[in-house]
Amino acid sequence: MTSFRMADITWPEYQEALAGDPVILIPVGATEQHGPHLPLSVDVILPTAVCEGVAAAGGYLVAPPLAYGYKSMPRSGGGQHFPGTTSLDAASLIAQVRDLTREFVRHGARKIAFIVGHTENLWHVSEGCDLAYRENAPNAEGLRLLNVGYWQFLPAATAQAIFGTTSIDWDMEHAGIMETSMMLHLRPDLVHMDRLVDHAPSRVPGYELWPYDIEAVPADGVLNTASSATADKGQQFLDAYVSSLSVALTEAFGAR
């Protein structure tokens, strides 16, 4: 096989790779505003990069990512009122996870991990996995499914070194230091630090409300300042995620 990226290999190469019982990594992102300084594709680029970092060590295949996710919530993504934030209903995302699982199982895959890059996706991907497992497990011996947000694997030492604390409000980090730093490392051509407005953290209520108060969301869509983001921090974040997620996948699926 010439690549760990499923989309880059031929079907015979893919068939041969499946014979080795690899873990299939599926990045699950979103098309969502990330302030005036980051592209709409952040939640796709970052989990894909983490998956590819893990896969480079061998024993994994990275499937094409899902580029649309569940609706943006004001307290974790700014909300649906931003142009460019293009979202799915929960049922649509759940159905995609079920359909993809069925297809990968049909190919012969038995180890599938959904690596989420958009907070609002998590519960709906879990529901999709639960339904897919119930449907496919009786006819797919050894089937195992995993769902996780990559940001949940930041080691305490890395958090302490960068944030000065191990207690991080990840909802408030939307378009913040972590995502901006990783984009500066991975795709600096898509980052516009000169457009970033340095302001106090958002005070969005800790509950969901319909209709929600647009005035409670910062006008630029950034929930916390990212002015201290750097490419070096981005490298630290990426290395930490790849290392710790690799360990977790080995625990969940067995040694590669």
Image (cartoon, rainbow, N blue to C red):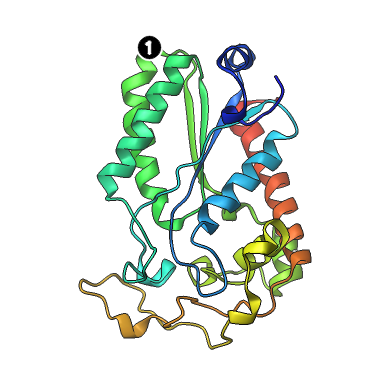
Q: Does residue 109 sit above or below 54 in this rendering?
A: above
Q: Identify which residue is drawn at 49% across, 17% down.
A: 142
Q: Nearer the viewer, residue 213 or 245?
A: 213
Q: Nearer the viewer, residue 86 or 76?
A: 86
Find the residue positioned furthest to the front.
189
Find the residue positioned furthest to the left.
210
Residue type at mark 1: give it: Asn
Which quarter shows the C terminus?
Answer: top right
Question: In the image, residue 97 lies at what x, y percent?
Answer: 38, 35
Question: In the image, residue 128 lies at what x, y percent?
Answer: 35, 37
Question: In the image, residue 115 lies at what x, y percent?
Answer: 53, 43
For label 1, the crowd category at 10 Å Cα-Cα, with few meaning under 14, some 14 to 19 and many 20 or more, is few
Q: Nearer the viewer, residue 98 or 8?
A: 8
Which residue is labeled 1 in the image? 139
Q: Identify which residue is drawn at 40% across, 71% down.
A: 78
Question: In the image, residue 20 lies at what x, y percent?
Answer: 64, 14
